Image (tube, helix red, strand yellow):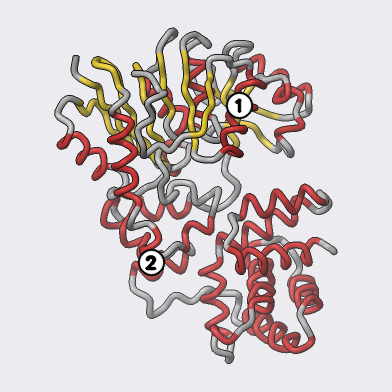
Amino acid sequence: MNGRERVLSLLVRAQKDGSYSNIALDAELAKNSSEKAFITALFYGVTERRMTLDHIIRSHSKTEFDDIDNETLQLLRMGLYQLLYMEIPESAAVNETVALAPERSKGFVNAVLRAFIRSGKHIVLDGLDELGKLSVGYSCARWIVKMWVNEYGAERTEKILAASFGRPPVFARVNTLVCDAEDLVYELAEDGIKSDVCDESGRCVVISGSGSIEKLRAYRNGLFHIQDLSSQKCCELLAPRPGDTVIDMCAAPGGKSFTVAELMNNKGAVYSSDLYESRVRLISDGAARLGLDIVNARVADASVHNDTLPEADRVLCDVPCSGLGVIRRKPEIKYKKKAEIEGLPEIQRKILENGAGYVKKGGRLVYSTCTLNRAENEDVAEWFAAENREFELKEMKTFFPCEDGGDGFFCAAFDRKS
């Protein structure tokens, strides 16, 4: 199969089974890495711009949108994306797309694409209200746009939406037990990888054009692990100290536990749990690669008290959430229905309450999510503070991808009174 055929196959499967785009793409490229850049750009691009592309299809099709079969729909999206957002000759974008269409829909695909070209390739948003223009223009569910406008204002919302396109930066947390940021930049350069120190602490670099991270010598030698910048800042808010006992309640794949162990100079104990054995193995393998022998990985339900866990100086509850802060990494999250996330705060409160039970007097509890949604963030934190007077809310912080560089993220720190 050529690159376009592989993208079509990926899009058809993703529409059917709802798989995350990054997982589906990684699995496909692992089979055959030819045309990797083109496949990645087209597959992610169509996924990111789906609502915008569908708006164009509705504007130029005489067939009812819901009557278009999945394969034909994906082809139209692919063709329109190439015409709008890729430096590909119009004739190639149309002809190559039509060539992939089944005989029954070749004429239809050709007609829609050429009608769009004749229109001047304009995206017409006339007749839509301001929320509709943001929703269609930035390809994001209307209810999410409305929520963000209400909570963060229209200007910041548009910046959040604009920041959701394109490949996000790859942040590498330096294993400070064995090197510093400058050492890591040098080691990556030896593998032909460009990177730059991205903060003043000397503990993080941003990697450019790395290809397969796992194949890098510096990765295999345990010099770093991949962790978003906002997540790293959350670990720093936890403020673990050498010799502490720390519990990471929802730890997989392990990035937070690794950073915490490094901040502790690999002295003390980090109990890292997750619900599934396969994910717990990711924590164990990562800790072994980094030489972090204080990380103890285990299967556990974060919402249920575990008598085998000790009292802890620090407890981190990075809870399951709607993921609205990571849409630049998983763009399909933008199309979730509101009903899919409404039950999350109840689960989050339960995990936070359970985590609080392990905190020593004088210890610290941190609650965090990778979402931008007051109901899952500030509301949960404020509820906990009101219901648990032995804890004092010390700090709440929301990180925005358009302002802070990392993913959208929320964290709140509570200190237990002594």
Give the quarter of the image for residue 206. top right
Report the amino acid beneath label 2: Arg
Front residue (pair 180, 157): 180
In the picture as drawn, the residue positioned furthest to the front comes out as: 307
* Label drawn at residue 24: none
Q: Where is residue 107 in the image (x, y as percent from the top left)?
A: 74, 89
Q: Which one is nearer the viewer's eye here, 164 or 22?
A: 22
Q: In which quarter of the image is the C terminus?
A: top left
Is disc 1 placed on a helix, strand or loop?
helix
In percent of the image, x 77 and y 62: which residue is there? Answer: 6
CB-based contact (under 8 Å), mark 1 and mark 2: no
What residue lies at 53% left-to-right and 20% top-to-bottom? 295
In the current view of this chain or complex, which residue is farthest to the bottom?
Answer: 62
Give the left or right position of residue 371, taking residue 93 as reference: left
308 left or right, relative to 265: left
Q: Mark 1 points at which residue?
A: 284
Residue 243: image location, x then y, percent: 43, 8
The residue indicated by pointer 2 is 142
**Local secondary structure at mark 2:** helix
Report the Cα–Cα distance between label 1 and label 2.
Answer: 41 Å
Q: Can residue 399 be seen in this view?
A: no
Q: Position of residue 186 (x, y in %)?
A: 71, 18
Dot 1 amino acid type: Ser
Q: Which of marks 1 and 2 is in front?
A: 1
Q: In this view, does 84 lie above or below 256?
A: below
Q: How crowded is mark 1: few (under 14 residues within 10 Å), some or many (20 or more)?
A: many
The answer to whether residue 308 is visible is yes
Residue 64, image x, y percentages: 54, 89
Q: Nearer the viewer, residue 125 or 338?
A: 338
- Structural crowding at the residue carrying mark 2, measured as other residues with C-alpha within 10 Å and reported as few (<14), some (14–19) or many (≥20): some
First along the sequence among labels 1 and 2:
2
